[in-house]
């Protein structure tokens, strides 16, 4: 009986969110949407995306995205864990720290970016 209890405790501990990977999902866009009223810009992204990057796994510390494409002007970031981000011109310079721009979990954010840049992401308490 004790063995079953210990086995169950191990399974539960490995299934807890503390052991889950923290990921940032990044989508790249070239244009923003237009309204039907005099072609006014709308605060929405125009689908389909240019690129949906491979999710950035930052569970082991700061991690960076791939460089943004040559026609990318906007990105959407969705982190499944509270995080902090830092944009890196030409993917150079320091990585994100916990004092970088904070983002809440599961709340997509949009940013204007420059082609060839990237974003660094780190978990933030």
Image (cartoon, grey):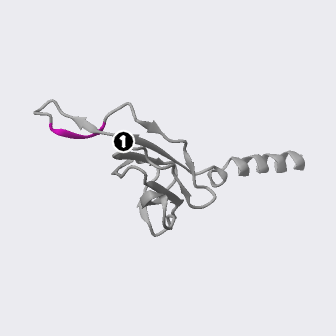
The location of residue 92, given as percent across then percent down, is 49, 62
In the rendered view, does 45 fall on the left or right side of 16? left
Q: Main secondary structure of the magenta part?
A: strand
Residue found 10% across the figure and 33% down from its top: 38
Residue linked to disc 1: 71
Residue density around tag 1, few if under 14, some if 14–19, many if 20 or more, within 10 Å: some
Residue found 39% across the figure and 44% down from its top: 70
The location of residue 23, given as percent across then percent down, is 55, 49
| The quarter of the displayed image where residue 50 is located | top left
Nearest the viewer among 55 and 21 is 55
| The quarter of the displayed image where residue 40 is located | top left
Above or below, 14 against 92 in this view is above
The location of residue 14, given as percent across then percent down, is 72, 49
Above or below, 30 against 19 in this view is above
In the rendered view, does 31 fall on the left or right side of 87? left
Q: Which residues are magenta?
A: 40-45
In the rendered view, does 35 fall on the left or right side of 7? left
Residue found 48% across the figure and 50% down from its top: 67
Nearest the viewer among 22 and 16 is 22
Secondary structure beneath label 1? loop
The location of residue 27, given as percent across then percent down, is 43, 41
Residue found 45% across the figure and 47% down from its top: 78
In the rendered view, does 123 fall on the left or right side of 10? left
Nearest the viewer among 49 and 10 is 49
């Amino acid at each position: 009986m004790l063995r079953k209890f210990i086995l169950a405790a191990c399974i539960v501990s490995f299934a807890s969110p503390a052991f889950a990977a923290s990921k940032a999902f990044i989508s790249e866009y070239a244009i923003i949407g237009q309204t039907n009223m005099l072609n006014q810009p709308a605060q929405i992204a125009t689908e389909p995306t240019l690129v949906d990057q491979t999710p950035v796994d930052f569970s082991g510390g700061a991690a960076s995205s791939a460089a943004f494409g040559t026609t990318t002007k906007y990105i959407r970031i969705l982190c499944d864990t509270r995080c902090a981000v830092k944009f890196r011109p030409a993917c150079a310079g320091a990585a994100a720290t916990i004092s970088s721009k904070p983002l809440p979990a599961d709340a997509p954010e949009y940013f204007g970016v420059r082609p060839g840049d990237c974003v660094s992401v780190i978990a933030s308490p």
